[in-house]
Image: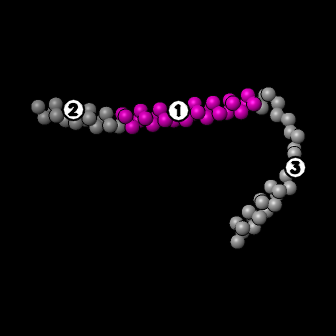
Amino acid sequence: MKLKFFFKILFFSLLLIENSYAYIDPGSGSALISVIIGFFVALGITLKTYWYKLKSFFNFSKDQANSNKEEKD
């Protein structure tokens, strides 16, 4: 019920939108580009960190199996 009311308000407010004549200066554009680049760099570092943790987890189990074999010999 509340969701239908929300969509009605959203629909009617979209019908009443007028031009805003807003000005976006060049500094805002460069700030937006910096945010986008920062997001992708942070995403890359996060993926790299988890990739190496996952890789070391599987390499550790192989190294542990090899060391157990050597101890038995």
- Is 43 colored magenta in this rendering? yes
Q: Is residue 25 above or below residue 9?
A: above
Cα–Cα span, label 1 and label 3: 41 Å
* Residue displayed at 79% across by 28% down: 27
Please say if 19 is above or below 47: below
Name the residue: 77% across, 64% down.
8
Tell me the residue that label 1 is attached to: 44
Of residues 45 and 72, the one nearer the viewer is: 45
Quadrant occupied by the C terminus: top left
Q: Is residue 71 left or right of residue 17?
A: left
In this view, which residue lies farthest toward the bottom? Answer: 1
- Please identify, in this view, whether the residue under mark 1 or under mark 3 is nearer the observer: 3
- Scheme by which the image is coloured: one colour
Residue that numbered label 2 is attached to: 67
Question: Along the polypeptide, which appears first: circle 1 or circle 3?
Answer: 3
Quadrant in the picture for residue 3:
bottom right
Please tell me which residue is depicted at 77% across the width and 32% down the height of the picture. 28
Q: What residue is disc 3 on?
A: 18
| Sequence-wise first label, 2 or 1 | 1
55 is higher (above) or lower (below) than 4: above
